[in-house]
Amino acid sequence: MNLIAAIMLFFATACTPEDKPLTPSPTTVGDITLTIGDQSFTAKMEQNSSSEAFRALLPLTLEMQELNGNEKYHYLSQSLPTNRTKVGTIHAGDIMLYGDNCVVVFYETFTTTYQYTPIGHITNPKGLKEALGIGSVTINFTSKIKEI
């Protein structure tokens, strides 16, 4: 094998696809806004596939039902990816996925043994309980998504 053939063989095998520099794939970042009547609340989204799948549905208007005096929920017509964990404590302002298609907005803090997939958290839930009121409520979810 001559020197030129050896050099060509080296360069042909020295840079496999695994050795190529990684170019980050575009991803989305940004908060979402929940609008209830004339009040708006900002939520920080989790960095997971469930959050991304939920964000892809936005803008979204959901008629959410009351449950247990601490949450509003709505069953989506499609399933989202899940990563259920025993969260232990639910905090007022948590936005979670119960099962694979039930979006839940919590307005009270309490302990639980149930498993949820976190989607996001309202950064300042002050006034959330009053805005949600008693019974069912309409919540508009919107997003300011940007590519990074």
Image: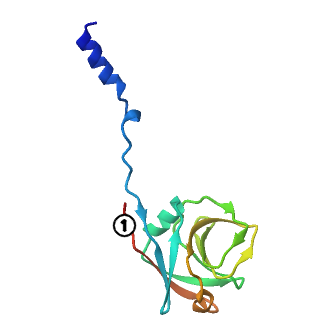
| 11 sits left or right of 101 in the view | left
The quadrant holding residue 12 is top left
Q: Position of residue 2 (x, y in %)?
A: 25, 7
Observer-nearest residue: 69 or 16? 16
Label 1 sits on residue:
146
- Indicate the quadrant containing the C terminus: top left, top right, bottom left or bottom right: bottom left
Q: Amino acid at mark 1?
A: Lys
| 147 sits left or right of 128 in the view | left
Colouring rule applied to residues: rainbow
Q: Position of residue 72 (x, y in %)?
A: 62, 81
Observer-nearest residue: 62 or 12? 12
Observer-nearest residue: 12 or 97? 12
Position above or below: 120 against 65:
above
Residue at 59%, 64% (x, y): give it: 100
Residue at 30%, 23% (x, y): give it: 11
Q: Position of residue 54 (x, y in %)?
A: 49, 68
| 21 sits left or right of 54 in the view | left
Q: Position of residue 110 (x, y in %)?
A: 73, 76
